[in-house]
Image (spheres, rainbow, N blue to C red):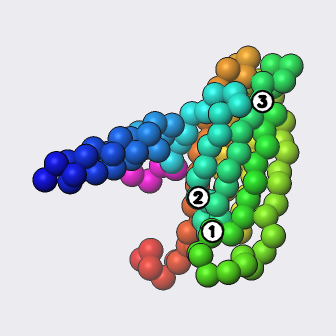
Amino acid sequence: MRNFAKLASVALFSGLAMLSGAAGVSAGEPAAYHVKPLKGVSFTVGSKRAVGYYAATDGACRLTLMLSDAYAGDGTPATAPVRVNLTVGSGATGSVDAVDGSVIFQCAPGATNMTVKVAQRVAYNAAAAK
């Protein structure tokens, strides 16, 4: 029983550590993460995985983002990873679009933090909406 309690506590704290950058989200809103300069963030954009960070440079957020296929553990990914460099001005927003999702980056005034919102794209079906 003691080992089970230790394992459960490790799993709980690991889960909380992974969620520490996530903000509360209500239904229908994209997931939001708040990131400090030079701190990494990892998230899913549709069928892609994204890993990135930003540096505060001259009051702007200089973002470096890597996009790749999600790792399935069964060999080489279908496509090569892509690196995106984007500078978002203080108080401004920028975005990166993937095939089936978008990421919106908002740089706080003075580049003190960056908000990352992931929006999954879902095809609209007019017949289903009736």
Q: CA distance from mark 3 to mark 2?
A: 21 Å
Residue on which disc 3 sits = 55
Q: Which mark is residue 70?
A: 1
Residue contact between numbered discs 2 and 1, judged by CB atoms under 8 Å: yes
Residue on which disc 2 sits = 44
Would residue 110 be found to the left or right of residue 124 on screen? right
Helix or strand or loop: what does disc 3 sit on?
Answer: strand
Q: Which residue of the protein is positioned furthest toward the left in this rendering?
A: 1
Asked if residue 93 shows in the view, the reply is no
User: Label 3 is placed on what type of residue?
Assistant: Ala
User: Residue 69 at what x, y percent from top left?
Assistant: 68, 69
Q: What segment carries the magenta color?
A: 25-30
User: Label 2 is placed on what type of residue?
Assistant: Thr
Helix or strand or loop: what does disc 1 sit on?
Answer: loop
User: Residue 85 at what x, y percent from top left?
Assistant: 85, 45
Q: Quadrant of residue 58?
A: top right
Pointer 2 local density, CA inside 10 Å: few below 14, some 14–19, many at least 20: some
Instruction: Identify the residue shown where x is 79% and y is 64%.
Output: 81
